Amino acid sequence: MDFGLSEEQEMIVKTVRGFVETEIYPHENEVERTGLVPPDLAAEIRRKCIDLGFYACNFPEEAGGAGLDHVTFTLVERELGRGSMALTVFFGRPSGILMACEGEQRERYLLPAVSGQKIDALAITEPDAGSDMRGMKCAARSDGSDFILNGTKHFISHADVADFIIVFAATGEEETSRGVKKKITAFLVDRGTPGFQILKGYDSVSHRGYHNCTLSFADCRIPASQVLGEVHRGFELANQWLYGTRLTVAATCVGRARRVFDMALSYAAERKQFGKPIGANQGVSFKLADMITEIDAAEWLTFSAAWRLDAGLTSDREIASAKLYASEMLARVTDEAIQIYGGMGLMDDLPLARFWRDARVERIWDGTSEIQRHIISRDLLRPLGA
Ligand SMILES: Cc1cc2nc3c(=O)[nH]c(=O)nc-3n(C[C@H](O)[C@H](O)[C@H](O)COP(=O)(O)OP(=O)(O)OC[C@H]3O[C@@H](n4cnc5c(N)ncnc54)[C@H](O)[C@@H]3O)c2cc1C
């Protein structure tokens, strides 16, 4: 196994980190203060990223993307994780599920998403259906060659800036060995479609400026040509494509933890109490030892899961372990960093309290820690018949 980076990967890491430090960091305080990203700033980030050739770098070249493999894309995500989520979203990583677009859907959704002309968002979660996707109530009934969509989605990230949303809805029921289950279908729904509203969501403690929205569908008519993948196969489609976002969460947690760690390390070496650097006390230095060990462990879990994807090996359990461990590691690292900074760690003058708040959501979205543990343990026990 080769643990080193290629020259190209080193260059990509350097470029993306430079981009985040020069184009993202200077705007973070203002976004944090106002909870808003000015549209001209969002457009500028997007344009610069397109010029750099990094927009949609998670997509294959045949679709117009940069064609990075999973390991290299994970490196990109790690570097983006250093910056504010509200700003780095405009760096542009459309949902991989768009690769399921067929025929004229490619021209209308896939290619504009990859070139940066359109932004997508993904809507699965509902007020009464979170971890249990099959419990969804949002339903689409067939009407001639159309579907009529009714229901509500909530917590939908960056739908406020999206041009179209990939919406999952129930399209029937089926008898299975484990009882009646909903059949689910994915739809491509344009902003502005009659009967479809994108409403302000909740104010969240994490990632200010990165908004979640509530979506409302009232007799919203969607032509069958806007079904993504096959009718009734949305659950399988989500399982096939959405693993990538869990790996993204793991990678961004590692990047953010490294930024926090660097701050804590410098402070431990500079801040003097009782006539010596606070880092000279084992009560502080051992925290740093634990932090870096956990960050490195999370990074290796993340890269080895990405490597397995590139090698075509099964990786559900490994991705779940990476997401679980990296998101829980980030919570511990941000908390300990604040402890090392003492009172100053809680003040808005530093970004530490922001990292600490931002860390909280990582254990919830894209599958909670409990759901990741469920995936991991099921993978271990199912072959034993348990
Ligand atoms: C800021 C934010 C942005 C989001 N963005 C999006 C988005 O863009 N698109 C989208 O579709 N969704 C999005 N989500 C939704 C997110 O994926 C869900 O919040 C998550 O899946 C959990 O669902 P829930 O919040 O309804 O919690 P619930 O599913 O109600 O869970 C509540 C608690 O019960 C536990 N629990 C549930 N079932 C089990 C079980 N079987 N075993 C053990 N414990 C269990 C959970 O782990 C959790 O602790 C976002 C959420 C947030 C907070």
Image (spheres, rainbow, N blue to C red):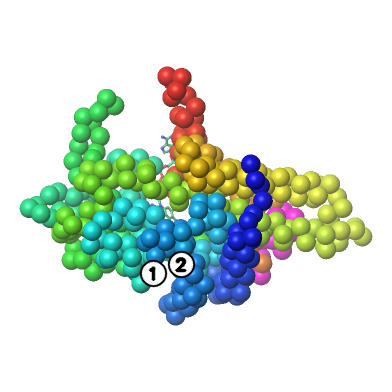
The amino acid at mark 2 is Tyr
Is residue 35 visible in this depiction of the protein?
A: no
The front one of 246 and 50 is: 50
Q: Judging from the image, what secondary structure is the residue with disc 2 in?
A: loop
Please identify the residue farthest to the right as the structure is shown.
275
Tell me what residue is drawn at x 43 percent, y 24 percent. Answer: 382
Tell me what residue is drawn at x 67 percent, y 51 percent. Answer: 4
Q: What is the x, y in percent for residue 106?
A: 28, 61
Q: Main secondary structure of the magenta part?
A: helix
Please identify the residue farthest to the left as the structure is shown.
144
Kindly indicate whether the residue at mark 1 contacts the one at mark 2 (C-beta within 8 angstroms). yes
Q: Is residue 345 magenta?
A: yes
**Disc 2: residue Cβ within 8 A of ligand 1's nearest atom:** no
Mark 2 or mark 1: name the one nearer the start of the chain: 2
**Disc 1: residue Cβ within 8 A of ligand 1's nearest atom:** no
Residue 20 sits above or below residue 75 on the image: below
The front one of 386 and 12 is: 12
Within 10 angstroms of label 2, few (less than 14), some, or many (20 or more) residues? many
Q: What is the x, y in percent for residue 114?
A: 38, 65
The amino acid at mark 1 is Ser
Q: Which residues are magenta?
A: 337-349
Q: Judging from the image, what secondary structure is the residue with disc 1 in?
A: helix
| Separation of marks 2 and 1 at Cα, in angstroms | 7 Å
Task: Check residue 129 in the rendering and tell me which mark sits there, or answer none.
Answer: none
